[in-house]
Image (tube, rainbow, N blue to C red):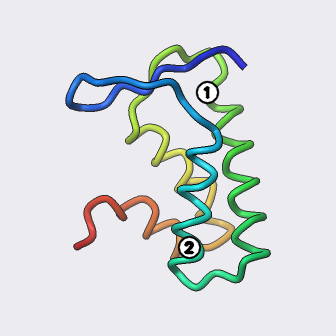
Amino acid sequence: MPEVTVRHSDKKSELFSVDKLRASILSAALANSVPEGQATQIADTVTKNVDKWLKGRAVVTPKDIRRVAAQTIEPLHPGLAFFYAHGDRII
């Protein structure tokens, strides 16, 4: 996979990490009481879908990644999709 830059709102950037995305999804799923096996399946499905979506893109934002991930999670676990889409804004 070609390198994809994730550009943050504070103008900092980093290379996209599929491992970081997978860990984020897995953590969110487990925090929402999703059974470990199902959480792992969701994380694997989402990382594959996001990886496909990244093809041909050089620069993305964390919001882009979160949006695509949440859209993939929605049919698998709607509650988790909402949490993942809005988790950075939930107090």
Q: Quadrant of the N terminus?
A: top right
Residue 81 percent across, percent down from the top left: 52, 66
The residue sitting at 40% across, 39% down in the picture is: 62
55 above or below 82?
above
Q: Amino acid at mark 1?
A: Leu
- Say left or right for 63 vs 47: left
Amino acid type for the residue under numbered disc 2: Pro
For disc 2, the marked residue is: 78
- The answer to whether 57 is drawn above or below residue 50 in the figure is above
Residue 71: quadrant of the picture: bottom right
The disc, 1 or 2, on the residue closer to the chain's N-terminal end is 1
- Quick one: 76 or 10, which is closer to the camera? 10
> What quarter of the picture does the C terminus occupy?
bottom left
Picture residue at 36% right of the left edge, 25% below the top: 7
Query: Where residue 82 appears, x then y in whole percent?
Result: 44, 68
Q: Position of residue 80 (x, y in %)?
A: 53, 72
Q: Residue 54's mark?
A: 1
In front: mark 1 or mark 2? 1
Q: Residue at x 67, y 51 (%)?
A: 46
Instruction: Sort mark 2 into few (<14), some (14-19) or many (20+) by Cα contacts within 10 Å.
Output: some
